[in-house]
Amino acid sequence: MQSFSSYERQNQFNRLTQEEWDVLVIGGGITGSGIALDAASRGMKTAVVEMQDYAAGTSSRSTKLVHGGLRYLKQFEVKMVAEVGKEREIVYENGPHVTTPEWMMLPFHEGGNFGPFSTNVGLRVYDYLAGVKKAERRTMMSADEAVEREPLVKRDGLKGAGYYVEYKTDDARLTLEVMKKAVEHGACSTNYAKVVDFIYDDNGSIVGAKVEDTVSGEQYHVKAKKIINAGGPWVDELREIDGSKKGKTLQLTKGVHLVFDQSVFPLRQAIYFDSPDGRMIFAIPRDGKTYIGTTDTTYDQEIAHPTMTEEDRDYILNAMKMMFPTVDVTADDVESSWAGLRPLIHEEGKDPSEISRKDEIFVSDSGLISMAGGKLTGYRKMAQTAVDLVRDQLMEEYGIRYSDSETKNMPISGGDVGGSKGFKKFKEERVQIGESLGLSQEDADKLIQLYGSNVDKVFNNFKDRKEEASQEGVDPVVFAQLVYALEEEMTYKPVDFFVRRTAALFFNIQWVRDHKTSVIDYMAKALNYSEQQKQEYTEQLDQLLEEAVTPIEYV
C-alpha cells in the first residue's frame, strides 16, 4: 500500500516525477478524490496534486449535507434529482461513519413559497425519483405536530410541514476518506502541490504538468497520458493556462454559514425553509451546536480566501428571526462561521440561486479534460463519467483496456464496518474498547464517528503514546488524533488538522484555542518547521480564528 504520511512528502514528489501516469488529477476536493479512487481502483496508474490541502476549497465549506436536491424539482431538474437522490444511499452505505440520515422538517406558512399541496406532491415525486426506501419516505404534519417537533419554528400563519430524510456529512472527512481509499489502490497523492504550467508534445497535445511544491518552492515535471482538471473554483484558471478558456465558463457564488451554541439557539430538529428571496436555508443541530445557512451571492474576489461579510451575516440573522422569532440572538452570539464557493457553470441572465448545479466535462484541443459544476452528493457518478471518458481514450489511443467502475459498492477508507446496519454494532463494540483504554464514553463515541474502521489506530495511539503526549504537553486524546493525522492523513499545517481533519474550527472553536499552541509546537518539531514556517502557520490559524467571528469587508 502507498504511503499517505506527511513524513513521506518528498518521496511522493520523487515518485510523481519518476513514473509516467495514465492519469494525473489536478485537485484534491471531492471531485478530484472521487476521480482518483475510480481510476486507481480500475488499475490505472493515477497521480493527484492539490495546490492547497485536501478539501480546502469548496469541499470543506458546503452545507455538509449529502442531499437529493429537493429544490431542483422547482427548476424541473428531474434527471438530476433522480440521479443524486439515488447516490445519497450509496454514499451513506460506503461510509456510514461520515454520512448519517437526518430527518428534515419543511414548514409551510400562509403566503410562503411552499404550501400543503405543493409540498406533498413535491415530496412524493422526490421519494419516487430518488428511490427513497420505505422507512425514509416523507410524511405530512399538521401545524400542531410541527410545533411539537420543533417549538422554535414560527407559529404565526403555520399551516403544517413536510417531513423527509436528508443525509448530513462531514464534507472534508468524506473527501479525505475517498482520497485515502484511492491511495490504498495505489494512487500517488500529495497536497501543497500547485500546477504552474502544462507540458505539450510537438503536436500541441498535453502530456504533463509542471508542479510546484509550495512548501519548498521546488518544481517537478509530471508526465501523464491524460490530465483531468478537477480544480473546482480554479477550473477556469487552469483552462487559461492551457489557452482553452472559451465557450462555457464558471460563475462563482459564495455561501456563508453561521454556528451558534445550543445554549443560545436550542434547535432540536433540522429545518429547511425558503427565505423571502427564494434562497434555501438549512438550520441543523450538530454536536451541541446549531449551524444555519446559506447565502448565495455572486463572487469575484480572491478564490482561495472567501470570507463572511456583515451583509452575509445579517442576511442569515434576519432569515433566522423570520423563521425562529423567539430565538433572541445577535451578531455577538455567532460562535464561528465559514464561507465557501460554488463553481457553477455560467448561465446568462440567471440569478445565482437559479443556476443549475449540473456537471459538465470540457475537452480542449490539447486534450485537457476539465470537469466543472456538480454537487457533493453526485461526486461518485461524476467521477465514473470522467474516468469512463479516460478509459475510452486510453483504449482508442494506446490499446490499453480498463474495466468499468467498481466504486458503487466499495467502502471508502474507514467504511469497513458492514454498511449502515453493521456500523451500529461496530460502534457499540468499539465504545467498550475505548472505555477499557481509559477514554470517556463521549470521547470514544466521537472518535469512532470521526474515523470509522480506522479508529483502532487512533485508539492504539492513545494507549501506547500517553507518556510521549505528556512529555510533549499535548492532551492524550488530541495527541492520538494528531499522530494519526500526521502518519496517515497527509496533514502538514496546523489549519489542516484544526479545520479539515477535525472540523473543530467550525464546531468546537474553543477546543482549537485550547490546544493550538501544543499542537503547533509538536508539529513544528515533528515536521522540522523553520522558525519562519512556524510563525507563518501560526498566523494563518490565528487569522482563520479571527475571521470565523469577525466579518471582513472586501475592498
Image: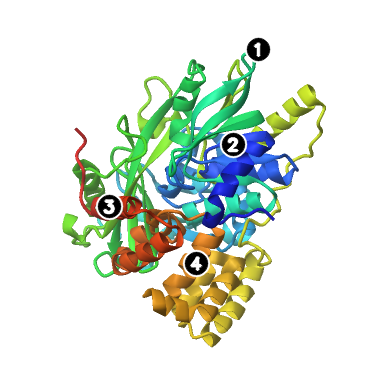
User: Separation of disc 1 and disc 3 at Cα?
Assistant: 46 Å
Image-quadrant location for residue 509? bottom left
Residue 52 in percent (x, y) is at 44, 43
Which mark is nearer the camera, 2 or 4?
A: 4
- Residue 196 lies left or right of residue 519; in this view the side is right
The circle drawn on residue 172 is none
Task: Identify residue type, mark 3.
Answer: Glu
Q: Is residue 203 above or below residue 467?
A: above
Task: Identify residue type, mark 1.
Answer: Asn
Q: Which of marks 4 and 3 precedes in the sequence?
A: 4
Give the residue at mark 2.
Answer: 25
Give the residue at mark 3.
Answer: 539
Image-quadrant location for residue 162? bottom left
Q: Residue at x 39, y 74 (%)?
A: 472
- Residue 218 lies left or right of residue 472; in this view the side is right
Q: Which of marks 1 and 2 precedes in the sequence?
A: 2
The circle drawn on residue 203 is 1
Secondary structure of residue under mark 1: loop
Q: Residue at x 63, y 45 (%)?
A: 188
Secondary structure of residue under mark 4: helix
